[in-house]
Amino acid sequence: MKVFPAATIKGLFQIKYAADNGAFVINLSLGGAGLSQSEIDAVEHAFVTKGVVVCAAAGNESADMDDDTLYGPVCADGDENWVLGLAAPIGSDLMAQFSQFS
């Protein structure tokens, strides 16, 4: 299931609905600095409680994600790794110059 944007009541409901109704993968088309507690709770419910693979874009600012800036939802879970971050490829297993990295 693709959810965009999650930062709405409808988006949060979609994450929970998908997790509760047998989704195997949820793709979150959102990003930016941090997440609200409601968004973190929805992602935690999907991954931790229901075992759903949650994916989201790593970002497009060519920034190192190991610094202190959180880029949610990929980094919003601390070191728990609830969300699989997806970088932008350019072929031959190379990362696009603008993609976030870690």
Image (cartoon, grey):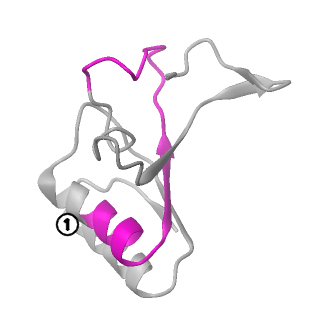
Residue sticking out furthest to the front:
79
Residue at horizontal 21 percent and vertical 63 percent from the top: 41
Per the image, label 1 sits on a secondary structure element best described as helix
Q: Does the magenta stretch include residue 9?
A: no
In the rendered image of this protein, does residue 5 appear above or below residue 78? below
Res 46 quadrant in image: bottom left
Crowd around label 1: few <14 · some 14–19 · many ≥20 (10 Å):
few
Residue numbers of the magenta segment? 42-69
In percent of width and height, residue 33 lies at 25, 31
Residue at horizontal 22 percent and vertical 44 percent from the top: 35
Q: Is residue 97 left or right of residue 57?
A: right
Q: What is the number of callouts on the image?
A: 1
In percent of width and height, residue 13 lies at 27, 74
Residue at horizontal 19 percent and vertical 66 percent from the top: 9
| Front one among 44 and 86 | 44
In percent of width and height, residue 72 lies at 31, 39
| Front one among 29 and 81 | 81
| Front one among 95 and 7 | 95
In percent of width and height, residue 67 lies at 32, 17
Residue sticking out furthest to the left:
37
Residue at horizontal 46 percent and vertical 73 percent from the top: 51
Residue position for label 1:
9
In the rendered image of this protein, does residue 23 appear above or below residue 94? below
In the rendered image of this protein, does residue 18 appear above or below residue 85? below
Three-letter amino acid code of the residue under disc 1: Ile
Residue sticking out furthest to the right:
92
Q: Is residue 1 left or right of residue 75?
A: right
